[in-house]
Image (cartoon, rainbow, N blue to C red):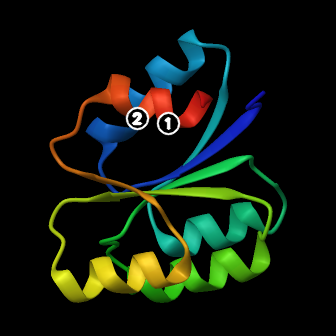
Amino acid sequence: MIEQVHLIDPSIFIQDQLVAVFQEKGIKILTSNSGTDALNLLAKTFPDIVIMEISLPDHKGITLLKSLRRALPRTRFIILASTLDKETLAEIIRVGIKDVFINPFCIENLLEKVVA
């Protein structure tokens, strides 16, 4: 069972929506607005899943993703993307990520992936 999710997304709108949905399902969700915030929080927590927007204001998303995958090898990652080019998608797949959602996405489909 999923106990804790960490959402890394600069959009307060996305954060508010996902926090409400996950809390309703009894899943604890931590949020970060930036890569720096995420690194600070993830140094102290070990979530079951990290949901991460690949376009962040302060870090190159793919570089942060690789770093987090090394630091949290047992954590599952789900990528959100406002825009996504073929090269970035190929790099995400090479890192071993299978779940990618392009905005706008269906929150119910995302929730399904989280609880699966």
- Mark 1 and mark 2: span between their CA atoms? 5 Å
Residue 59 seen in the current view: no
Q: Position of residue 16 (x, y in %)?
A: 38, 30
Crowding near pointer 1: few (<14 within 10 Å), some, many (20+)? Answer: few
* Amino acid identity at mark 1: Lys
Q: Is residue 78 above or below residue 61?
A: above
Q: Is residue 47 above or below residue 62?
A: above
Q: Which mark is residue 113?
A: 1
Would you say 90 lies left or right of 67 here? Answer: left
The quadrant the N terminus occupies is: top right
Residue at the spot x=18%, y=49% of the render? 103
Q: Nearer the viewer, residue 84 or 22?
A: 84
Quadrant housing residue 10: bottom left
Residue position marked by numbered label 2 in the rendering: 110
Tag 2's secondary structure?
helix
Quadrant housing residue 105: top left
Q: Is residue 35 above or below residue 20?
A: below
Tag 1's secondary structure?
helix
Whether label 1 touches label 2, CB < 8 Å: yes
Residue at the spot x=75%, y=49% of the render? 47
Residue 53 seen in the current view: yes
Q: Position of residue 88 (x, y in %)?
A: 28, 83
Q: Position of residue 86 (x, y in %)?
A: 18, 82
Q: Nearer the viewer, residue 20 or 104?
A: 104
Residue at the spot x=39%, y=55% of the render? 9
Residue found farthest to the top: 24
Q: Position of residue 33 (x, y in %)?
A: 44, 58
Residue at the spot x=60%, y=28% of the render? 115
Q: Is residue 114 above or below residue 25?
A: below
The quadrant the C terminus occupies is: top right
* Amino acid identity at mark 2: Leu
